[in-house]
Image (spheres, rainbow, N blue to C red):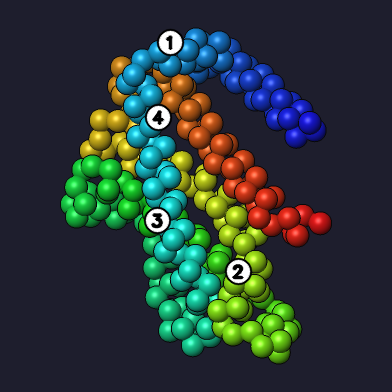
């Protein structure tokens, strides 16, 4: 209940600041909350609006799944093997600082203008966030915990399942929550090129028609997507990492 009240308080404050900004900037620059919600209800009755929402949701979920399946096992492996980490470390350090969005033209050339190029771009950006966080968390597992399991007759598979994986899971969920902001922001950019559906295209199309309320509808929908993802990972962490909540 307290969490719901916190959210309600935050929403009311944001709406208040939004309304003040609309008064100061004028309706031609900042749509009011009322006009935005009125436009949202009107748009929600159209199939095209939900097709845009569905396209963006599919791209986000596909990118999250791909990056998770690839980055997390690799991060666990590198964090558990000093030799492998020493070999891979220079490659990671050289490629991580490069802004991945610059590869968007190449992704469009290689994977085409459809969903695949956009999903791969999102997955590439999420990959490094999950990889580095998982690797560092696995490296931080105490030796005493590892030696305790090995002294009881456990093998390397048992070590991964019963020690390394549970110890790194909270950090992985933290990385996923942080990644929600990144993936939604990048989604807007990748959907601005070579697509006819998605919330990024929806916002740019409204901008081209100078439809300010519709622009804010798109912004609001992207914000709600980010909040849903964040809360989903928070709930999953509470379910699967109950021991860390004590």
| Residue 141, percent from left and from top | 67, 76
Name which residue lies at 47% across and 22% down. 216
Q: Residues within 10 Å of mark 2 (few under 14, many from 20)?
A: many
Which callout, 2 or 4, points at the residue further toward the start of the chain? 4
Q: From the image, tell me which residue sits under label 2.
A: 165
Name which residue lies at 45% across and 64% down. 71
Q: Quadrant of residue 18?
A: top right
Q: CA distance from mark 2 to mark 3?
A: 19 Å
Which callout, 1 or 3, points at the residue further toward the start of the chain? 1
- On the question of residue 144 being in view, the answer is yes
Query: Is residue 167 placed above or below 147 in the rendered structure?
Result: above
Q: From the image, tell me which residue sits under label 3.
A: 66
Which callout, 4 or 1, points at the residue further toward the start of the chain? 1
Q: CA distance from mark 1 to mark 3?
A: 35 Å
Which callout, 4 or 3, points at the residue further toward the start of the chain? 4
Q: From the image, tell me which residue sits under label 4.
A: 53
Q: Quadrant of residue 103?
A: bottom left
Disc 2 is placed on an element classified as: helix
Q: From the image, tell me which residue sits under label 1.
A: 42
Q: Quadrant of residue 228?
A: top right
């Amino acid at each position: 209940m307290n969490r719901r009240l916190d959210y309600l308080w935050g929403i009311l404050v944001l709406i208040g600041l939004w309304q003040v900004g609309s008064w100061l900037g004028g309706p031609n620059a900042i749509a009011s909350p009322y006009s935005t919600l009125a436009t949202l209800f009107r748009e929600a009755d159209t199939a095209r609006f939900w097709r845009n929402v569905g396209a963006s949701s599919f791209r986000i979920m596909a990118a999250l799944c791909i990056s998770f399946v690839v980055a997390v096992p690799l991060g666990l492996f590198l964090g558990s093997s000093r030799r492998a980490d020493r070999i891979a470390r220079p490659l990671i350090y050289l490629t991580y600082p490069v802004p991945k969005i610059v590869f968007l033209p190449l992704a469009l050339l290689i994977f085409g203008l459809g969903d695949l190029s956009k999903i791969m771009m999102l997955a590439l950006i999420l990959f490094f966030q999950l990889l580095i966080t998982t690797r560092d968390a696995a490296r931080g597992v105490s030796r005493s915990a590892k030696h305790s399991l090995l002294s009881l007759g456990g093998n390397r598979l048992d070590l991964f399942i019963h020690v390394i994986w549970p110890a790194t899971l909270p950090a992985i969920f933290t990385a996923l929550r942080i990644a929600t902001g990144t993936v939604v922001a990048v989604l807007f950019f990748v959907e601005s090129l070579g697509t006819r559906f998605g919330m990024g295209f929806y916002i740019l199309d409204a901008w081209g028609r100078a439809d300010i309320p519709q622009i804010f509808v798109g912004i609001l929908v992207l914000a709600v997507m980010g909040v849903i993802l964040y809360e989903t990972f928070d709930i999953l962490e509470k379910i699967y990492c109950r021991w860390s909540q004590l």
